[in-house]
């Protein structure tokens, strides 16, 4: 009986996820490597606007702007800001140029899986979607070197059926994806822009 109930739940989850199937992407306007290699990143300021809604209910398909359970209890805004900052820092750490710069960043969206989605989502579903605005300023003069643009850094999640884990492994995967996207944006790594279709949100 319990097994049958779980099958029904998984089927309903599949229907829900299928309804939310979307095209996801990694996208940005690249900075030339000649430009970025003249920089050293002195500070990364990440703002998480109060207007962004935080998911607090463990459902399969949450509608809020911030969905994050991987760090356990705590202030989700602080947690996702730290992840975004870590990914940007990791992706830009190779810059050792003479021009000190500041990254001003504003989070738009941070969607990972809820525990319920992680456990019932079928094979080949689930997305970790991070979107943010970024502007680059000269740390000495405040001159804008790169005007504000939107960066999309979406990646495929690993659900329970795919051998994924919640927590530190999930967090590391998202940090690494942001770092990879940052290197592509800065022209210091492969251009990883692209699109993929996935059942998720």
Image (cartoon, rainbow, N blue to C red):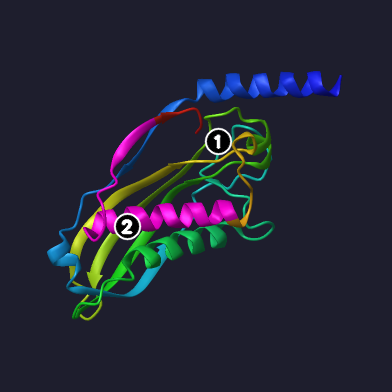
The quarter of the picture where the N terminus appears is top right
Give the residue at mark 2: 182
Give the residue at mark 1: 63
Identify the residue at image location x=80%, y=18%: 4
Among all residues in the image, which is located at the extreme left? 34
Q: Nearer the viewer, residue 201 or 174?
A: 174
> SS for tag 2?
helix
- Mark pair 2, 1: CA separation: 27 Å
Measuring from the top left, give residue 16's x and y in whole percent: 58, 22
Task: Please give the range of residues in magenta.
Answer: 169-196
Q: Quadrant of residue 189?
A: bottom left
- Tell me, yes or no, whether the highlighted magenta stretch contains residue 178: yes
Of the numbered discs 2 and 1, the one sitting upstream in the chain is 1
In-image side of 196 versus 111 (left or right): left
Q: Quadrant of residue 58?
A: top right
Q: Quadrant of residue 84?
A: bottom left
């Amino acid at each position: 009986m319990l097994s049958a109930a779980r099958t029904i739940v998984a089927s309903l989850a599949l229907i829900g996820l299928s309804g939310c199937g979307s095209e996801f992407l990694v996208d940005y306007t690249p900075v030339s490597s000649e430009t970025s290699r003249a920089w050293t990143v002195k500070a990364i300021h990440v703002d998480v606007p109060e207007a962004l809604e935080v998911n607090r209910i463990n459902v399969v398909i949450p509608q809020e702007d911030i969905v994050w359970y991987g760090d356990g209890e705590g202030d989700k805004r602080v947690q996702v800001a730290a992840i975004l900052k870590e990914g940007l820092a990791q992706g830009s750490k190779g810059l050792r140029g003479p021009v000190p710069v500041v990254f001003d960043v504003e989070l738009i969206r941070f969607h990972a899986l809820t525990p319920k989605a992680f456990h019932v989502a079928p094979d080949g579903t689930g997305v970790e979607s991070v979107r943010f605005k970024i502007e680059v300023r000269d740390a000495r003069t405040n001159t804008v070197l790169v005007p504000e643009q939107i960066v999309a850094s979406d990646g495929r999640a690993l659900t329970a059926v795919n051998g994924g884990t919640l927590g530190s492994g999930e967090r590391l995967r998202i940090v690494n994806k942001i770092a990879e996207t940052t290197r592509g944006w800065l022209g210091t790594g492969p251009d990883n822009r692209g699109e993929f279709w996935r059942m998720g949100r």
